[in-house]
Image (cartoon, rainbow, N blue to C red):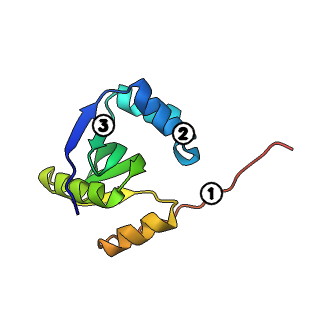
Amino acid sequence: MAAVEEIIPVPWCQEAEAAFRSHPDTAEDLDNIRAEIQDETAQLLRFTGPADMWLVTRLERYPDGKRELVLVNAIGKNSRLVLDVCEKAARRLQADSLRCHVRSRALMRILEARGWQAGRTVYEKALTNV
């Protein structure tokens, strides 16, 4: 499999806004994503080459000293390559773990094939005004 050609940390921009707005799973979180990038709570990465992806990451530090690299949100293609890069980055950052929330069954299979395990379970209930 080809390598990622370039990983570019970037500030929030119109191209990222359009990419995240284009997908229903990321569009609903757009305000939070933008705010975390702008206040530097999270980092926006642009992957180019065989992996064409926007990825928002955040390094979380816990009171017990553990560190976790969180893959907050992504839009693009070739997640296999990006996951490999993220694992290497987490090791360089001396993170104890990686975490992401997943809706896609295909991505769940990709994660499981790379040794990820389901951790926390998130339940959702849509509330609508009648």
Q: Tell me which residue sits at (28%, 43%) in the image.
A: 47
Q: Residue 66 lies in what quarter of the image?
A: bottom left
Q: Residue 58 lies in what quarter of the image?
A: top left
Label 2 is placed on what type of residue?
A: Ser
In this figure, which residue is indicated by the disc labeled 1?
124
How far apart, in angstroms, are the residues tagged by discs 2 and 1? Answer: 22 Å
Q: Quadrant of the C terminus?
A: top right
How far apart, in angstroms, are the residues tagged by discs 2 and 3? Answer: 20 Å
Q: Earlier in the sequence, mark 2 or mark 3?
A: 2
Residue 22 marker = 2
Task: Please name which of the two marks, 2 or 1, marks the residue nearer to the observer.
Answer: 2
- The secondary structure type at the circle numbered 1 is loop
Look at the numbered discs 2 and 3 and tell me whether their residues touch, using CB distance below 8 Å. Answer: no
Q: Is residue 66 visible?
A: no
Q: Tell me which residue sits at (22%, 42%) in the image.
A: 7
Depth check, front residue: 88 or 23 = 23
Q: Tell me which residue sits at (12%, 52%) in the image.
A: 92
Q: Residues within 10 Å of mark 3 (few under 14, many from 20)?
A: many
x%, y% of residue 32? 48, 35
Q: Is residue 38 visible?
A: yes
Label 1 is placed on what type of residue?
A: Glu
